[in-house]
Amino acid sequence: MQLADSTSARHSGSMTYAALDLGTNNCRLLVGTPTAEGFRVLESFSRVVRLGEGLRQSGCLSPQAMDRAVEALQACADRLARRRMSGMRAIATEACRQATNSGEFVARVARQTGLQLDVISTREEATLALESCAPLLAGEGRRALLFDIGGGSTELVWVRLAQDQRPELIGTMSMPVGVVGLSEQYGAAAFTERGFTTMVADVTARLHGFEGIHRITQELRHGGVRLLGTSGTVTTLAGEVLALERYRRVYVDGQVLSREAAAGAVAALRRMGRDGLAAHPCVGPERADFVLAGCAIYTAIHTMWSVPEVTVADRGLREGMLLRLIRHARHRAARS
């Protein structure tokens, strides 16, 4: 999954596919062309839209949040209009699942941008994350716990691993806790010792149900359990551990952090305060308010299931959608 230069993109005769993910905090677009290994990225777009801002209190998407999202979606539609697309899919996740006015918003998006948003289920969200991260789970291990810390929810995916086979989903859980809602709930208290500890305890209490069903702690005693995280939180931890002067996906995706290194990165980020986080090259002012909420969710997960290492994935729903689009196209071609 490498970025194509403009020359190769212009002269490639390959099929072109696009995946758009409208989350609780971000709007992201990925355009790619198939390769033997997966796909080559032709274009990538990401904008913070804070669609879920205030949703926890009001139960609906605010006019301002919808305006920001529609503006970003129009920018995506304009980019797509310049290309001949072989297939595309646009999805929305937790904010639109929760909001009482999501139907009105989806209709507005279709009317103003021409984009048809699918509001996907929590299970499909989990399976798309697994689809994109499957290559990072190749190799050793019997089981894997994948977690995706989002803006409005956190997905947990419990996976069976087998040699030379695709990872098999055993079970999933979607916690209606993400970095946007948690940061709004705790506000400035998230930057205090007591507030952070309370956030971790809040999330930990929600994890017991998943543990009770799948007995992951018992599996840990047998060994061969891997932990993999995909989200801005874990990529930020990797950036801090690697002391990156600016964020570089090529250094972060697939990076393996020891439990101690990741915990040290959490502690370092907590010491910075909001101003320090805003100036951090892997955070920035748009994410400064959400980082510690993500760190609290991560800390709860890695404390509950104390795996020695965590693999970091800078890939997610967009990559999963692109891989599915390409695979389905190949299946159709093989049958014709």
Image (cartoon, helix red, strand yellow):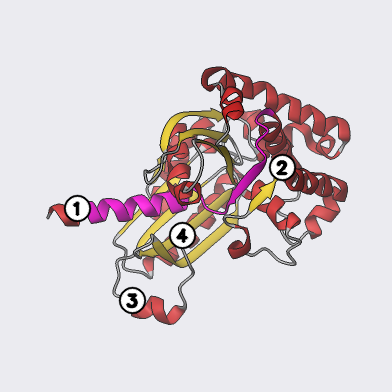
Magenta part of the protein: which range? Answer: 304-332
- Point out the tag, 3 or 4, that comes first from the N-terminus: 3
The residue beneath circle 3 is 12
- Point out the tag, 1 or 3, that comes first from the N-terminus: 3
Query: Closer to us: mark 3 or mark 4?
Result: 3
Query: Closer to us: mark 2 or mark 1?
Result: 2
- Point out the tag, 2 or 1, that comes first from the N-terminus: 2
- Callout 3: SS: loop
- Callout 4: SS: strand
Q: Residue at x 38, y 43 (%)?
A: 166
**Residue 332: which disc?**
1
- Point out the tag, 4 or 2, that comes first from the N-terminus: 4
**Residue 30: which disc?**
4
Report whether 332 appears left or right of 66. left
Q: Residue at x 46, y 48 (%)?
A: 138
Please name the amino acid that badge 4 sits on: Leu
* Residue lying farthest to the left in this orientation: 336
